Amino acid sequence: MKPSLSISVQYKMKVFGFSFLLMSLILIRVGLAQDLSSWSFEVQQGVIIPHSEELARVAQSHPMGIKVSFEEMPTSKDAWSNCNCFHYLGLNLSYHDFRNPDILGKGITLSGSFEPLLWHQKKWQVTLKTAIGVSYLTKVYDVDTNPENLFFSSPISFMMSVSPKIRYRLSNHLSTNLSLNYNHISNGGQSQPNKGMNFPMIGWGFSYLTANIPLPSYEPERLVKKMTFLVDFLGTNRNNPKGGGRVGSFGVSLDANYQFSYLNGFGGGLEANWDKAVELLYGKRGYIQGVYLAHHLMFGRFDFSQRMGLYLIKPPGYIENKSFFQRYILNYNVLKNTRVGLGIKAHGHVAENMEVRLGYEF
Protein backbone atom coordinates (compact mmCIF):
# COMPACT_ATOMS: atom_id res chain seq x y z
CA MET A 1 0.00 0.00 0.00
CA LYS A 2 1.33 3.44 -0.88
CA PRO A 3 1.92 5.45 2.33
CA SER A 4 -0.04 8.67 2.62
CA LEU A 5 1.90 11.91 2.34
CA SER A 6 -0.86 14.07 3.77
CA ILE A 7 -0.20 15.83 7.07
CA SER A 8 -2.87 15.42 9.70
CA VAL A 9 -5.04 18.39 10.58
CA GLN A 10 -3.80 18.08 14.14
CA TYR A 11 -0.16 18.36 13.05
CA LYS A 12 -0.88 21.38 10.88
CA MET A 13 -2.68 23.08 13.74
CA LYS A 14 0.24 22.35 16.07
CA VAL A 15 2.84 23.70 13.63
CA PHE A 16 0.92 26.84 12.76
CA GLY A 17 -0.19 27.35 16.37
CA PHE A 18 3.40 27.20 17.60
CA SER A 19 4.52 29.52 14.81
CA PHE A 20 1.73 32.01 15.49
CA LEU A 21 2.61 32.08 19.20
CA LEU A 22 6.32 32.55 18.52
CA MET A 23 5.82 35.32 15.97
CA SER A 24 3.19 37.04 18.14
CA LEU A 25 5.50 37.15 21.15
CA ILE A 26 8.29 38.64 19.07
CA LEU A 27 6.00 41.18 17.40
CA ILE A 28 4.60 42.25 20.77
CA ARG A 29 8.12 42.59 22.18
CA VAL A 30 9.29 44.55 19.14
CA GLY A 31 6.26 46.82 19.33
CA LEU A 32 6.86 47.61 23.01
CA ALA A 33 10.49 48.68 22.67
CA GLN A 34 11.52 50.89 19.79
CA ASP A 35 15.11 51.58 20.91
CA LEU A 36 17.22 50.38 18.01
CA SER A 37 15.93 48.60 14.92
CA SER A 38 17.25 47.63 11.49
CA TRP A 39 16.35 45.99 8.20
CA SER A 40 18.82 43.40 6.88
CA PHE A 41 19.40 41.61 3.60
CA GLU A 42 21.76 38.64 3.23
CA VAL A 43 22.82 36.25 0.45
CA GLN A 44 24.03 32.74 1.31
CA GLN A 45 25.90 29.85 -0.30
CA GLY A 46 26.45 26.42 1.25
CA VAL A 47 26.68 22.64 1.10
CA ILE A 48 24.51 19.71 2.19
CA ILE A 49 25.97 17.27 4.73
CA PRO A 50 25.25 13.64 3.68
CA HIS A 51 24.92 12.15 7.17
CA SER A 52 24.06 8.65 5.90
CA GLU A 53 25.11 6.62 2.85
CA GLU A 54 21.72 6.69 1.14
CA LEU A 55 21.84 10.51 1.08
CA ALA A 56 25.27 10.86 -0.51
CA ARG A 57 24.20 11.06 -4.17
CA VAL A 58 21.38 13.56 -3.63
CA ALA A 59 23.54 15.73 -1.35
CA GLN A 60 25.95 16.79 -4.10
CA SER A 61 24.25 20.13 -4.79
CA HIS A 62 25.22 23.51 -3.28
CA PRO A 63 22.20 25.40 -1.89
CA MET A 64 21.80 29.13 -2.36
CA GLY A 65 19.66 31.42 -0.23
CA ILE A 66 18.51 34.95 0.51
CA LYS A 67 17.20 36.26 3.81
CA VAL A 68 15.36 39.45 4.74
CA SER A 69 15.16 40.34 8.45
CA PHE A 70 13.70 42.95 10.74
CA GLU A 71 15.64 43.21 14.00
CA GLU A 72 15.11 45.22 17.17
CA MET A 73 17.47 45.71 20.12
CA PRO A 74 15.91 46.94 23.39
CA THR A 75 18.40 48.90 25.51
CA SER A 76 16.55 49.18 28.83
CA LYS A 77 17.95 47.60 32.01
CA ASP A 78 14.92 45.28 32.27
CA ALA A 79 15.47 43.97 28.73
CA TRP A 80 19.22 43.63 29.34
CA SER A 81 18.54 41.64 32.54
CA ASN A 82 16.65 38.95 30.59
CA CYS A 83 19.97 37.55 29.39
CA ASN A 84 22.59 39.76 31.11
CA CYS A 85 23.40 41.07 27.64
CA PHE A 86 22.19 43.29 24.85
CA HIS A 87 20.38 41.25 22.22
CA TYR A 88 18.51 41.51 18.96
CA LEU A 89 15.02 40.05 18.52
CA GLY A 90 14.16 39.40 14.90
CA LEU A 91 11.68 38.20 12.30
CA ASN A 92 13.25 36.53 9.27
CA LEU A 93 11.96 35.49 5.86
CA SER A 94 14.31 33.08 4.05
CA TYR A 95 14.30 31.49 0.60
CA HIS A 96 16.51 28.48 -0.16
CA ASP A 97 17.11 26.88 -3.54
CA PHE A 98 18.60 23.42 -2.95
CA ARG A 99 19.84 23.36 -6.57
CA ASN A 100 18.17 20.03 -7.33
CA PRO A 101 14.72 21.03 -8.62
CA ASP A 102 13.40 17.54 -9.41
CA ILE A 103 14.23 15.92 -6.06
CA LEU A 104 14.85 18.60 -3.40
CA GLY A 105 13.06 21.65 -4.79
CA LYS A 106 13.01 24.87 -2.78
CA GLY A 107 12.07 26.08 0.69
CA ILE A 108 10.53 29.22 2.19
CA THR A 109 10.93 29.80 5.94
CA LEU A 110 9.44 32.28 8.40
CA SER A 111 11.35 32.33 11.68
CA GLY A 112 11.88 34.22 14.90
CA SER A 113 15.39 34.82 16.24
CA PHE A 114 17.32 35.70 19.37
CA GLU A 115 20.81 37.19 18.89
CA PRO A 116 22.88 38.17 21.95
CA LEU A 117 25.97 40.38 21.65
CA LEU A 118 28.99 38.38 22.72
CA TRP A 119 31.46 41.26 22.22
CA HIS A 120 31.22 44.79 20.88
CA GLN A 121 33.20 47.99 20.35
CA LYS A 122 32.32 51.27 18.67
CA LYS A 123 32.05 49.79 15.14
CA TRP A 124 32.39 46.03 15.67
CA GLN A 125 29.97 43.46 17.05
CA VAL A 126 30.25 39.69 17.45
CA THR A 127 26.89 37.95 17.93
CA LEU A 128 25.40 34.45 18.04
CA LYS A 129 22.02 34.25 16.31
CA THR A 130 19.66 31.36 16.95
CA ALA A 131 16.41 31.02 15.01
CA ILE A 132 13.47 28.64 14.83
CA GLY A 133 10.57 28.74 12.41
CA VAL A 134 8.35 26.96 9.93
CA SER A 135 9.34 25.97 6.38
CA TYR A 136 7.27 25.23 3.31
CA LEU A 137 9.05 22.72 1.04
CA THR A 138 8.12 22.29 -2.62
CA LYS A 139 9.47 18.71 -3.00
CA VAL A 140 9.04 15.88 -0.49
CA TYR A 141 9.40 12.11 -0.41
CA ASP A 142 7.00 10.01 -2.45
CA VAL A 143 7.47 6.25 -2.69
CA ASP A 144 6.61 6.33 -6.41
CA THR A 145 7.48 9.77 -7.78
CA ASN A 146 10.28 10.99 -5.48
CA PRO A 147 11.80 8.03 -3.58
CA GLU A 148 15.30 9.56 -3.38
CA ASN A 149 14.28 12.51 -1.23
CA LEU A 150 14.83 10.99 2.19
CA PHE A 151 15.55 14.43 3.66
CA PHE A 152 11.95 15.69 3.65
CA SER A 153 8.61 13.91 3.96
CA SER A 154 6.36 16.80 5.03
CA PRO A 155 5.83 19.99 3.01
CA ILE A 156 5.35 21.81 6.35
CA SER A 157 8.45 21.31 8.54
CA PHE A 158 10.51 23.08 11.17
CA MET A 159 13.80 24.87 10.56
CA MET A 160 16.41 25.70 13.19
CA SER A 161 19.66 27.57 12.71
CA VAL A 162 22.68 28.76 14.68
CA SER A 163 24.70 31.62 13.19
CA PRO A 164 27.87 33.18 14.59
CA LYS A 165 28.11 36.63 13.02
CA ILE A 166 30.54 39.54 12.73
CA ARG A 167 28.99 42.99 12.17
CA TYR A 168 30.90 46.13 11.11
CA ARG A 169 29.29 49.57 11.07
CA LEU A 170 30.09 51.48 7.87
CA SER A 171 28.21 54.66 8.83
CA ASN A 172 25.56 55.88 11.24
CA HIS A 173 22.86 54.00 9.33
CA LEU A 174 24.64 51.24 7.41
CA SER A 175 26.51 48.11 8.52
CA THR A 176 27.77 44.97 6.82
CA ASN A 177 28.03 41.46 8.23
CA LEU A 178 29.63 38.09 7.60
CA SER A 179 27.95 34.99 9.07
CA LEU A 180 28.30 31.23 9.27
CA ASN A 181 24.86 29.59 9.32
CA TYR A 182 24.30 25.99 10.41
CA ASN A 183 20.75 25.10 9.32
CA HIS A 184 18.62 22.05 10.05
CA ILE A 185 15.22 21.28 8.52
CA SER A 186 13.14 18.41 9.91
CA ASN A 187 9.52 17.58 10.62
CA GLY A 188 10.41 16.56 14.19
CA GLY A 189 9.45 12.91 13.70
CA GLN A 190 5.88 13.74 12.69
CA SER A 191 6.13 11.65 9.52
CA GLN A 192 8.63 9.29 7.91
CA PRO A 193 11.21 9.19 6.44
CA ASN A 194 12.68 11.93 8.58
CA LYS A 195 16.40 12.07 7.88
CA GLY A 196 16.29 15.87 7.96
CA MET A 197 18.72 18.14 6.16
CA ASN A 198 21.79 19.80 7.65
CA PHE A 199 23.24 22.49 5.40
CA PRO A 200 25.86 24.99 6.61
CA MET A 201 26.04 28.24 4.63
CA ILE A 202 28.24 31.32 4.51
CA GLY A 203 26.27 34.57 4.43
CA TRP A 204 27.16 38.16 3.55
CA GLY A 205 24.84 41.10 3.76
CA PHE A 206 23.97 44.65 4.77
CA SER A 207 21.76 46.24 7.42
CA TYR A 208 20.07 49.63 7.46
CA LEU A 209 19.89 50.98 11.02
CA THR A 210 17.22 53.46 12.09
CA ALA A 211 19.48 55.22 14.60
CA ASN A 212 23.02 55.33 15.98
CA ILE A 213 22.37 54.87 19.71
CA PRO A 214 25.34 54.32 22.07
CA LEU A 215 24.77 51.28 24.27
CA PRO A 216 24.56 51.99 28.01
CA SER A 217 26.67 50.13 30.54
CA TYR A 218 25.01 47.78 33.03
CA GLU A 219 26.51 45.52 35.69
CA PRO A 220 25.17 41.98 36.13
CA GLU A 221 24.04 40.77 39.50
CA ARG A 222 26.74 39.13 41.56
CA LEU A 223 27.17 35.50 40.53
CA VAL A 224 26.53 32.95 43.23
CA LYS A 225 27.96 29.60 42.18
CA LYS A 226 25.37 27.05 43.10
CA MET A 227 23.88 23.63 42.46
CA THR A 228 20.27 23.56 41.26
CA PHE A 229 17.90 20.69 40.56
CA LEU A 230 15.19 20.54 37.92
CA VAL A 231 12.26 18.21 37.41
CA ASP A 232 11.17 18.41 33.78
CA PHE A 233 8.04 16.99 32.15
CA LEU A 234 7.86 16.51 28.37
CA GLY A 235 5.14 15.61 25.91
CA THR A 236 4.51 15.29 22.19
CA ASN A 237 2.52 13.19 19.74
CA ARG A 238 3.74 11.13 16.81
CA ASN A 239 2.39 9.34 13.76
CA ASN A 240 0.62 6.08 14.60
CA PRO A 241 2.87 3.44 12.95
CA LYS A 242 -0.04 0.97 12.78
CA GLY A 243 -2.58 3.23 11.10
CA GLY A 244 -4.05 6.73 10.89
CA GLY A 245 -4.00 9.36 13.58
CA ARG A 246 -1.41 10.15 16.21
CA VAL A 247 -0.27 8.67 19.51
CA GLY A 248 1.32 10.24 22.57
CA SER A 249 4.83 10.26 23.98
CA PHE A 250 5.43 11.47 27.55
CA GLY A 251 8.39 11.61 29.86
CA VAL A 252 10.08 13.04 32.92
CA SER A 253 13.69 13.90 33.73
CA LEU A 254 15.54 14.76 36.93
CA ASP A 255 18.45 17.12 36.28
CA ALA A 256 21.25 18.49 38.47
CA ASN A 257 23.16 21.56 37.26
CA TYR A 258 26.15 23.38 38.76
CA GLN A 259 26.48 26.95 37.45
CA PHE A 260 30.17 27.85 37.52
CA SER A 261 30.08 31.09 35.44
CA TYR A 262 27.58 33.69 34.23
CA LEU A 263 27.05 31.71 31.02
CA ASN A 264 27.92 28.09 31.78
CA GLY A 265 26.69 25.21 33.85
CA PHE A 266 27.46 21.50 33.84
CA GLY A 267 25.46 18.57 35.19
CA GLY A 268 23.56 15.41 34.41
CA GLY A 269 20.54 13.37 35.26
CA LEU A 270 18.13 10.53 34.66
CA GLU A 271 15.15 10.43 32.30
CA ALA A 272 12.25 8.06 31.61
CA ASN A 273 10.01 8.11 28.54
CA TRP A 274 6.78 6.29 27.65
CA ASP A 275 6.29 6.30 23.87
CA LYS A 276 3.13 4.73 22.42
CA ALA A 277 4.58 4.70 18.87
CA VAL A 278 7.58 2.69 20.10
CA GLU A 279 5.24 0.32 21.96
CA LEU A 280 3.18 -0.34 18.84
CA LEU A 281 6.32 -1.15 16.85
CA TYR A 282 8.48 -2.96 19.41
CA GLY A 283 6.38 -3.81 22.47
CA LYS A 284 7.48 -3.69 26.12
CA ARG A 285 5.08 -0.78 26.83
CA GLY A 286 7.35 1.60 24.94
CA TYR A 287 9.34 2.28 28.12
CA ILE A 288 12.73 3.94 27.57
CA GLN A 289 15.19 4.97 30.27
CA GLY A 290 18.56 6.68 30.10
CA VAL A 291 21.19 8.72 31.90
CA TYR A 292 22.88 11.81 30.49
CA LEU A 293 25.50 14.50 30.91
CA ALA A 294 24.47 18.08 30.15
CA HIS A 295 26.00 21.46 29.39
CA HIS A 296 23.89 24.56 30.03
CA LEU A 297 24.46 27.81 28.15
CA MET A 298 22.58 30.44 30.17
CA PHE A 299 21.61 33.97 29.19
CA GLY A 300 19.60 35.30 32.13
CA ARG A 301 16.17 33.66 31.85
CA PHE A 302 17.17 31.62 28.80
CA ASP A 303 18.80 28.21 29.22
CA PHE A 304 20.00 26.31 26.15
CA SER A 305 21.11 22.83 27.23
CA GLN A 306 22.73 20.04 25.27
CA ARG A 307 22.42 16.52 26.64
CA MET A 308 24.41 13.42 25.67
CA GLY A 309 22.55 10.34 26.87
CA LEU A 310 23.15 6.63 27.27
CA TYR A 311 20.23 4.19 27.07
CA LEU A 312 19.78 1.97 30.12
CA ILE A 313 16.48 0.38 29.03
CA LYS A 314 14.86 0.28 25.59
CA PRO A 315 12.70 -2.26 23.70
CA PRO A 316 14.58 -4.73 21.45
CA GLY A 317 14.66 -3.41 17.88
CA TYR A 318 14.30 0.26 18.82
CA ILE A 319 17.15 2.34 17.32
CA GLU A 320 19.23 -0.76 16.66
CA ASN A 321 23.01 -0.50 17.03
CA LYS A 322 22.76 2.84 18.85
CA SER A 323 23.34 3.17 22.57
CA PHE A 324 23.52 6.98 22.71
CA PHE A 325 21.11 9.83 22.06
CA GLN A 326 21.10 13.64 22.26
CA ARG A 327 18.61 16.24 23.36
CA TYR A 328 18.74 19.95 22.59
CA ILE A 329 16.49 22.02 24.86
CA LEU A 330 15.67 25.72 25.04
CA ASN A 331 13.97 26.75 28.30
CA TYR A 332 12.71 30.13 29.46
CA ASN A 333 11.99 31.03 33.09
CA VAL A 334 8.45 32.46 33.08
CA LEU A 335 8.39 32.69 36.90
CA LYS A 336 11.10 32.46 39.53
CA ASN A 337 11.22 28.66 39.57
CA THR A 338 8.99 27.64 36.65
CA ARG A 339 10.19 27.23 33.08
CA VAL A 340 8.72 26.29 29.75
CA GLY A 341 10.58 25.17 26.66
CA LEU A 342 11.00 23.17 23.51
CA GLY A 343 13.27 20.19 22.95
CA ILE A 344 14.50 17.91 20.19
CA LYS A 345 15.62 14.32 20.61
CA ALA A 346 18.11 13.07 18.03
CA HIS A 347 20.42 10.19 17.16
CA GLY A 348 23.45 11.71 15.49
CA HIS A 349 22.24 13.97 12.68
CA VAL A 350 18.73 12.44 12.61
CA ALA A 351 16.01 14.08 14.71
CA GLU A 352 13.45 11.68 16.19
CA ASN A 353 10.85 14.07 17.62
CA MET A 354 10.13 17.52 19.00
CA GLU A 355 8.59 18.02 22.42
CA VAL A 356 7.07 20.64 24.70
CA ARG A 357 8.59 20.84 28.18
CA LEU A 358 7.47 22.17 31.56
CA GLY A 359 9.89 22.25 34.46
CA TYR A 360 10.30 23.34 38.06
CA GLU A 361 13.67 24.33 39.53
CA PHE A 362 14.55 23.98 43.20
Image: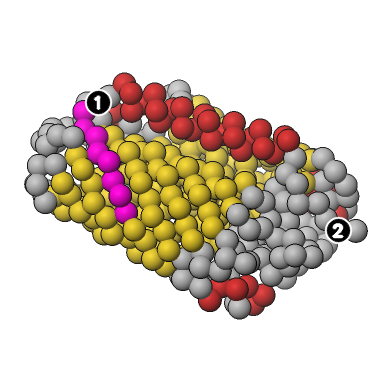
- Residue placed most toward the observer, 48 or 75: 48
For mark 2, does the 10 Å Cα neighbourhood hold few (<14), some (14 to 19), or many (20 or more) residues?
A: few
Sequence order check, earlier mark of 2 and 1 = 2
Residue drawn at (28%, 59%) of the image:
204
Mark nearer the viewer, 2 or 1:
2
Residue 335 on image: x %, y %:
45, 23
Q: Secondary structure at mark 2?
A: loop
| Amino acid on which disc 2 is placed | Lys
Q: Which residues are magenta?
A: 34-42
Q: Is residue 304 magenta?
A: no
Tally of numbered tags: 2
Position in image of residue 259 (x %, y %): 38, 44
Q: Quadrant of residue 1?
A: bottom right
Say which residue label 2 marks: 2
Where residue 186 sits, quadrant-wise, is bottom right
The spot of residue 262 in percent (x, y) is 30, 43
Q: Residues within 10 Å of mark 1 (few under 14, many from 20)?
A: few
The answer to whether residue 264 shows anywhere in this view is no
**Which of the 4 quarters of the picture holds residue 72?**
top left
Q: Is residue 312 above or below residue 85?
A: below
Q: Residue at x 88, y 50 (%)?
A: 242
Q: Residue under circle 1?
A: 34
Q: Amino acid at mark 1?
A: Gln
| Most foreground residue, 279 or 73 | 73
Q: Residue furthest right?
A: 1
Q: How far from the left and from the top, in percent, is residue 227? A: 43, 40
Q: Give the answer, above or below, for where 283 lies relative to 208.
A: below
- Look at the numbered disc 1 and give the secondary structure of its residue: loop
